[in-house]
Image (spheres, rainbow, N blue to C red):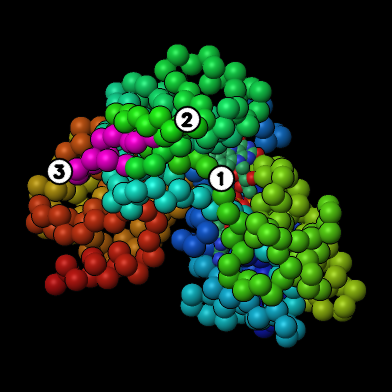
Amino acid sequence: MDNLVENLGTENVVIIGSGPAGYTAAIYAARANLQPLLITGFTSGGIPGGQLMTTTFVENFPGFPDGVLGPDLMDLMKSQAVRWGTKLIESDVTSIKCIDKPFEITTLEEKIKSNSVIIATGASANRLGIINEELFWSKGISACAICDGATPQFREADLAVIGGGDSACEEAVYLTKYGSKVHLIVRSNKLRASAAMIDRVNANPKIQIHWNTSVTEAIGSEWLENIKTIDLDSNQEVIKVKGLFYAIGHTPNTGFLNNQLEIDSRGYIKCESGRPETSIEGIFAAGDVADAEWRQGVTAAGSGCMAALAAERWLSEKNLAKIITREQPEPKKSESSTNNVDEDTNEETFDFNSEWQKGSYALRKLYHESAKPILVIFSSPSCGPCHVLKPQLKRVISELNGQVQGIEIDIDKDQEIAKQAGINGTPTVQLFKDKLLKRQWKGVKQRSEFKEAIKSLIK
Ligand SMILES: Cc1cc2nc3c(=O)[nH]c(=O)nc-3n(C[C@H](O)[C@H](O)[C@H](O)COP(=O)(O)OP(=O)(O)OC[C@H]3O[C@@H](n4cnc5c(N)ncnc54)[C@H](O)[C@@H]3O)c2cc1C
């Protein structure tokens, strides 16, 4: 980045959330020379990049005639925001003090003062609370078919998806790539998805729809084996499935606001219709967190643009804007991470001392021959959280100066290895030393957790 990063003391604008709304707001605010600070979120209320990190192809975002992978689209938005001078903090916001100005935003690590705030914290997947849900969570039950569908346990198995909207239909169709049959469990007597999506479900012979049906219980021993359902006439059925995927809507991420802003009965931030201003002057909202109706990538991006323009206007009306200066009017081209194509390491390219390699060949060699700890990330190409975690792990490894080696295993390509390692969801990270599994993590975790575990193995 060839902008002058200025220490503003009190920020012009803090943007909370890194989905399409947050990154679009950041692009506009950065181009207005406000040097926005964007807090990406980490584990609370989704992951960095937001909901599109959990999907495969986005076919309706303008500018991509052949579709674009959700994680790639979010990587591009991030690069664009950073290129124009957005500062990023990878953390969760735990609270905001809205009464005093400047506003005070508290993250997991620090307190930040800002003259204006844009809230773009989106929405989180709902859970059902059925019997044994906790017991089988990540052992057959998942809220993200796109992230977990490729795991070995689901291949050629019967699976179920709960829900009747676009997400449920998309996930059911997606899962037919892996499962032998997909039961779509719909609480009412119709699907609420788009006509095109309903057509795809109806045209797929592997999908069976169960109308007016709810799931009450998950049954199994080590892994999910059956689900119990009940229909409107109280008929109960036990369906044999190895996977149960929730696609039952979202709850807006507004808990950290502690009711200081006006919120509607479902938790969405109240704004004037079609506008980003909230009930508190200087605080703006964008995207799904304030939109119970449209909830699309492009509408979130559009409202992010409105929120940034409104914040810019408000800051200059109040004489609060501190405009930064740039060395170059045109920043350097971005280094989009989507341009990096990682090839699997093979016999010729294997390097015994390399910090990061990919594929089963490198894993076998280092597992048997390396005296260092080995950190293995099991990922799949469409897994958004894996996009988030990989750079974090690479950073941990580089900070440890060659005392640990990292390997990425694509479970789609290396199914046998994934099976042997007992992988049932991505991302899963395993830490080995002297051929022994020392630690395992599922999902996105703070860098410090990995670092401490590795350090404890280095003498
Ligand atoms: C499976 C799936 C498929 C979809 N497919 C499409 C599609 O094809 N086309 C389309 O247009 N839309 C699609 N959508 C909808 C689209 O993803 C959302 O409308 C859009 O992502 C909303 O953007 P957002 O920026 O408002 O919020 P989100 O994308 O939800 O992002 C919210 C951000 O806020 C962060 N956050 C939350 N709480 C905190 C906190 N306390 N502190 C800091 N940060 C926080 C999160 O980490 C996240 O980065 C899909 C959604 C899903 C779930």
375 is higher (above) or lower (below) than 384: below
- Number of the label disc, if any, that sits on residue 365: 3
Sequence-wise, which precedes: disc 3 or disc 1? 1
Task: Give the Cα separation between the discs numbered 1 and 2.
Answer: 25 Å
Position of residue 95 in the picture relative to residue 443 (left or right): right
Residue 379 shows up from this direction: no
Q: Residue at point 76% right, 48% down?
A: 302
* Image quadrant where residue 17 sits: bottom right
* Disc assigned to residue 233: 2
Q: Which residue matches tag 1?
A: 249
First reached walking from the N terminus: tag 1 or tag 2: 2
Instruction: Give the CA distance from mark 3 to mark 1.
Output: 44 Å
Q: CA distance from mark 3 to mark 2?
A: 59 Å
Disc 3 is placed on an element classified as helix
Q: x%, y% of residue 203?
A: 53, 14
Horizontal and vertical percent position of residue 101: 75, 84
